[in-house]
Amino acid sequence: MEAENFSVGLDIGTTKIVAIIGRENEYGKIEVLGSGRSKSLGVHRGVVNNITQTIESIQMAVEQAELNAGLKIGSVVVGIAGQHIRSLQHSDYITRPNAEEVINEDDLERLCNQVYKLVMLPGEEIIHVLPQEYRVDGQSEIKHPVGMYGGRLEANFHVVVGQVSSIKNIGRCIKSAGLDLGNITLEPLASADAVLSQEEKEAGVALIDIGGGTTDLAIFKDGIIRHTAVIPFGGNVITEDIKEGCSIIEKQAELLKMKFGSAWPGENKDNEIVSIPGLRGREPKEITLKSLSKIIHARVVEIVEQVYVEIKNYGHEEQKKKLIAGIVLTGGGSQLKHLKQLVEYITGMDTRIGYPNEHLAGDSDEEVASPLYATAVGLLMKAIDGDRKPIQIEPEIEDKEKEASPKDVDSRAETLARAQQKGRKSIFDKWSEKLKEFLDNAE
């Protein structure tokens, strides 16, 4: 295949590592050119704990994707999760030297850069600074202040913080696998891009991404990210419980969970039995599906209740913060039978399973459209967004409008809106530039 513009998303998970190569087609949909998947061996609960094994797993996934696409991968956008991630709310302001000049992207950048200088706990670093609402000279609830007049620019920020060592370890694995780190982004934000519609984000929605090692939560309201959290439990803990409860090996426990597992014990009859082959000529074990689903149910309830505590902490009970679009479940763990019904029962909120197929071109591989690949597709979308060239806009737009035709004014307004969007995206890139600098200096 000819070397065209393409982007790569790399999802380093606890159970699997996925690399997806893709590009945007003329209809704005994502065309997947190739994907690769390998078993993740050096990651525990979203955190790298064996550098060598992680590098090997990354290389396997990348080689498979390269083979499928017939392309050579250079730069990747990678996701970060893990129990070390936490988030906080912060307000900050800047005073502008000339209130008679309109607010521009530089002012927003200066305000965001100020937040990046916040003093964190030892060993922690800011990953994302996400602006929520702006205030200009006391006027509140402004979403895009570019083009307004004002002397004091304030904003509320959602700040995502992670452990420096964990982040650097991911960067080191990427470099050692022979790849360039294009950007690093929080996994729940990537999953949200892949499975949530703009209408859901406006109405208010909680995205729950149940992975192998962690369960990630992202809450949106009025189109803005409001809360993120990472719960250090996922599908692997359920497998571990089945392994201990039924006295079988991990591989058998995983197969049992996937083939016969259910989050709702009431649906299995007492006489439904599955036989597990014994080890090395030992007698086979007989397990009732009712006792299997009881084990799964107990752990799933614990995970869902922890997530619900986070949703309530955001203030879901208040009318102003009500999440009208309810809950969207995604990730490999969301494929567990009757999970949707259990989540609705515990939370009382409307629930659906999120598939990333809305953004994919019609001829995409069915496997990639599975909730299992939601994070990887979201990272690919972030990579495509990051690869778009910045739009140049004329600084004296207001003077030229006087002599411009209405058609020109419309097109400039459109360009300005696109530039504002670009400016908001550029905030995500700042931290990864810092990380790349650190990794280059470390060599």
Image: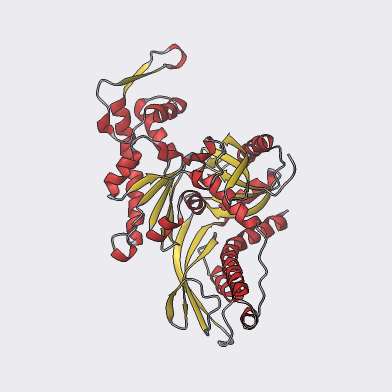
Instruction: Please say if 68 is above or below 144.
Output: above
Q: Splitting the image into 4 quarters, where does residue 285 fall? A: top left
Q: Splitting the image into 4 quarters, where does residue 58 fall? A: top right
In x, y percent, where is residue 61?
62, 37
Write the residue at 54% across / 39% down. 368
Q: The N terminus is located in which quarter?
A: top right
Q: Nearer the viewer, residue 279 or 349?
A: 349
Q: Is residue 184 left or right of residue 144?
A: right
Instruction: Please say if 95 is above or below 322.
Output: below
Q: Splitting the image into 4 quarters, where does residue 343 fall? A: top left
Q: Is residue 334 left or right of residue 4?
A: left
Q: Is residue 397 left or right of residue 345?
A: right
In x, y percent, where is residue 246?
35, 26
Write the residue at 51% across / 83% down. 152
Q: Nearer the viewer, residue 188 or 416?
A: 416
In x, y percent, where is residue 332?
46, 39
